[in-house]
Image: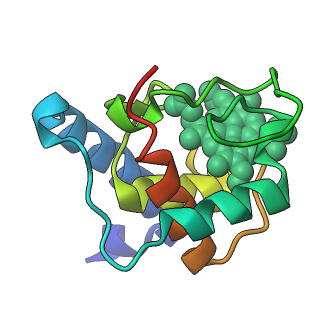
Amino acid sequence: MGFRTTGEAMGRRVTVGALALALCACVDKADLPRPMVQADPVAGLAVIEEVGCAACHKIPGVAWPEGRSGSNLAGFGARPLIAGRLPNQPDVLIRWLIDAPSMDPGTAMPPMPLTQDQARDVAAYLYTLDED
Ligand code: HEC
């Protein structure tokens, strides 16, 4: 019983890692695209423009000077992994968009000022980007 109380935060991190491993094992292109119910990709695009994701990323459909410090998000919907190391699934992506450093303290992707609903819509837009 004692070992169960040794730190909630630590346990959470282990859980995310285990989840990443479990999902990586079975994610492949056959699972794509990822339908997201109750999400609005058009609203997501508006949020992307509002918060300025394109300052760092090249994002198809976004009319901004193209960012280069982050990655090109063209084709993101067809990729199995987020940032090459997390399973590209809606719930994981939503958390990444709101607070990437909580999932990987070393990442250069900053936390973004998005509500859960906004992040869900943004994720839905990113999943429409399935061609490079
Ligand atoms: C200050 C620059 C910056 C801003 C602003 C930013 N990002 Fe990022 N983003 C990054 C960097 C750098 C990475 C690469 C992180 C890594 O590999 O650890 C990244 C990674 C990502 C990834 C994973 C990409 C991949 O190839 O797997 C996605 C998706 C993403 N960002 C979406 C967004 C969205 C959507 C927004 C706006 C809500 C946003 N980013 C805002 C810098 C930024």
Q: Position of residue 81 (x, y in %)?
A: 38, 32
**Is residue 20 visible from the viewing direction of this image?**
yes
Q: Position of residue 29 (x, y in %)?
A: 18, 30
Q: Position of residue 56 (x, y in %)?
A: 81, 33
Task: Say which residue appears at 45% left-offset and 59% top-offset.
Answer: 124
Q: Is residue 15 above or below residue 121?
A: above
**Is residue 108 visible from the viewing direction of this image?**
no
Q: Position of residue 36 (x, y in %)?
A: 32, 66
Task: Say which residue appears at 80% left-offset and 20% top-offset.
Answer: 68
Query: In the shown orientation, is residue 5 left or right of residue 25?
Result: right
The image's colour scheme reads rainbow
When asked about the image quadrant of residue 32, the answer is top left
In which quadrant of this rendering is ligand 1 seen?
top right
Q: Nearer the viewer, residue 98 or 61?
A: 61
Q: Nearer the viewer, residue 65 or 12?
A: 65
Q: Is residue 122 above or below residue 52?
A: below
Q: Quadrant of the N terminus?
A: bottom left
When asked about the image quadrant of residue 119, the answer is bottom right
Query: In the shown orientation, is residue 100 left or right of residue 128?
Result: right
Q: Is residue 55 above or below residue 44?
A: above
Task: Say which residue appears at 33% left-offset and 50% top-offset.
Answer: 89
Q: How many marks?
A: 0
